Image (spheres, helix red, strand yellow):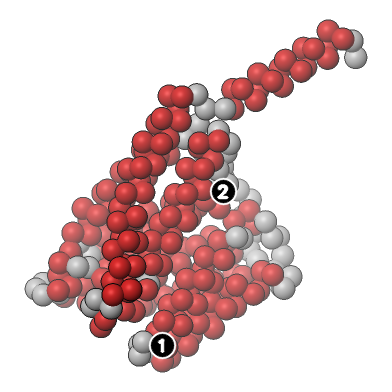
Amino acid sequence: MTTTQLLSTSSAETAAVQVSRPGRGRRAAVGLTALLACALPTSFAVSITGMLVTGAEADHRFHQLTGQGLLLAALWFGGLVPLIRAGWRGVRPTATAGYLHLAFVGSGLVAAAVSAGGGARSLLAIVAGTGALLWAALPLRPRLRARVSLDPVLTPLALAVAALLVPFAVDQLQLQLATTTGYHAENPHLFDMAWVAVVLTVLALAGAVVPTVRGLFVWVGGGCALIGGAGLLLGESWVFSSAALVLGLAALVAPRLGLSRNRA
């Protein structure tokens, strides 16, 4: 290779790196949309943490730990933060981050279409709108198209998660629809619980059939374990809580024991 070719190759590589780095305008767009997208979940997390610390509305502590509060906020931030970091650096976000965020927003939209109580549709309009603005601002977007391959261990586990959480979500939405007055009519905790249950179900199914996003089972396992553990500690249904805890632990352990194949 000649000196001219070496210089040309070096210049091309440098240009490629420079092109991948977002300019001030792009970073400003990422920063602004990040602030908009993170404002609401930050408010949720701060408010619910305050309730848990002070003991406010102690009879709703299960909701505060899970669907209404900390688990909901964790899933929300779990999709947003990797997208924001990648956008700021000018690199492509992982498929796992993209799937997580889309599952969170899409599940909420489906749940809101079924039950609009407590301002659920207005909430999801903000969630989806700010999320869409963030995606539009990203210099590179996640690659969502991927090879599909059913995992022989994770697929049955995902179906078991769905069998537990889908009826629970339907029950919570029916209760929310039936609530027209009182506390839950203005504070849709039941809708939030259904939302989280649907998100975890979608993540489990996606992680079971798409090898590049097997990492979603960390969220499935952690979410189910939190729901189950909190339920057992706070007097929720023993059968449901125990099943959620067992499935959560299985979702956390199975991918790490080499029991599944085609891991990311």
Q: Which numbered dot is residue 233?
A: 1
The residue that mark 2 highlights is 95
- The residue under the point 11% across, 72% down is 180
Say whether residue 244 is left or right of residue 176: right
**Mark 2–mark 1 contact, CB under 8 Å?**
no
Q: CA distance from mark 2 to mark 1?
A: 35 Å
Give the residue furthest to the left: 181
Figure check: 87 above or below 229: above
Q: Nearer the viewer, mark 2 or mark 1?
A: 1
Q: Which numbered dot is residue 72?
A: none
- Residue 37 image offset from top left, x and y in percent: 35, 46
Q: Return the residue nearer the eye: 18 or 58.
A: 58
Q: Secondary structure at mark 1?
A: helix
Label located before the other in sequence (2 or 1): 2
Quadrant occupied by the N terminus? top right
Residue 47 in view of the camera: yes
- Residue 49 image offset from top left, x and y in percent: 34, 67
> Which residue type carries mark 1?
Leu
Residue 210 in view of the camera: no
- The residue under the point 60% across, 78% down is 250
- The residue under the point 40% across, 57% down is 76
Give the residue furthest to the top: 4
> Which residue type carries mark 2?
Ala
